[in-house]
Amino acid sequence: MRKLVVALFSLGLMAGCTSTDSEFVDTDGITAIFDVEVAEQDGGATVWAILHQGDADSSTYVKMSGGDKLIAAVSVAGGQYTSDKEMDEQQAFGSTAYRADFSDFDDGSEEFKIEFDRSGSGKDSALASTVVLPPKFGFSGFQIDQVDVVDTSHIAFSRSSQDFYVQWDPFNPSADYDMGYEVDGPCIAAQTVGTADVGGYEFDPNTIRSATGKDAETCQVTFRLIRSNDGTVDSAFMGGKFKASQIREFTFTSAP
C-alpha cells in the first residue's frame, strides 16, 4: 500500500485527480481500498484507507466531511476491539488517503477493522470491514552458489551465472494465506511472483532478468517477501478489498 499511495499521489499529479466531500456521496457509490502493512519484523502496523467515488478505477477520491470519519481498531485473540484511532488524512495533488499507526500490534493473528462512521452526515455507515494479519516472519539466511553469505550487509551476485537462495522463518506450507515476492531495480525487469510458504526460495541463473538494454549494467535491487491475507469490506460499500500483509525486504547488488 505504501507503493500504492506513492503511485496514487503521482497519478494525481499527472492525471489531475480530484477529491470530493463525503457528505455528498452515498455509501453504495463508494469503493473502499483498505490495507494493513507490517514492514519490519517488530515495526508495528500501518493501516491505510482509500475511498473512490465510483469504482476502483475512478480518479475522484472521497475525503471526510460533514462529520464522517474513518476509524481503525484492532482485536487480539478474538477479544474486544481496542485502540480505536481516527485515521489521519494524507492529501496531495487532488488524491486523498487515510492512515493510522499501531506500534504494538504486529505479531500476526490480530484482526483489524475499519469503520466508516457516517452518524455525523446521516448517511449509511459501513462498520464491518475486517482483515486478519498473517503471522510475522524474518529472513534467516542467504546462500550464493550454495555458500552461506556471512556479510549480509552487502549481498552481491551475478543474475546470469549464479544461484541465489533466500531463507525465512517461521514458515507453514499448509497455511491458507498468500505468499509471494517482488524484485525491482533500475537494471532488471521487475517481477511479482507467488510462491509457497516453504521457508526458502532459489533464484536460478536468469530468474532475475536484465531490463531491456541493461544486460551489462550493475545496480541495487530491492527484494520484498510478502505474506498476505484477504479480508472483507462492509456490504454497504459499492465494493472494494481489504488486505493485510507482513512485508520483509532487503537490497542486494545485481551484476550482469
Image (cartoon, rainbow, N blue to C red):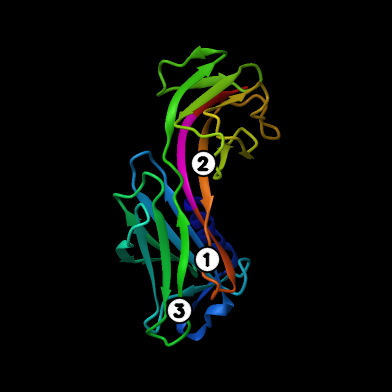
Answer above or below: position of 127 versus 153: below
Residue 217: x %, y % from top left: 61, 26
Q: What residue type is labelled 3?
A: Ser
Q: Kindly tell me whether residue 209 is visible in this rendering.
A: yes
* x 46%, y 61%: residue: 130
Within the magenta stretch, is there residue 247?
Answer: yes
- Looking at the rendering, the stretch of residues picked out in magenta corresponds to 244-251
* x 37%, y 84%: residue: 120
The residue singled out by tag 3 in the image is 125
Cβ–Cβ under 8 Å for marks 2 and 3:
no
* x 41%, y 40%: residue: 136
Give the total of numbered labels: 3
Q: Which of marks 3 and 1 is nearer the N terminus?
A: 3
Within the magenta stretch, is there residue 159?
Answer: no
**Label 2 CA crowd tier, 10 Å (few <14, some 14–19, many 20+):** many
Q: Residue furthest right?
A: 212
Q: Which residue lies furthest to the bottom in this view?
A: 122
Q: What residue type is labelled 1?
A: Val
Question: Can you tell which mark lies on residue 233?
Answer: 1
Residue 159: x %, y % from top left: 62, 23
Q: Earlier in the sequence, mark 2 or mark 3?
A: 3
Q: Nearer the viewer, mark 2 or mark 3?
A: 3
Q: Kindly tell me whether residue 191 is visible in this rendering.
A: no
SS category of the residue bearing label 1 = loop
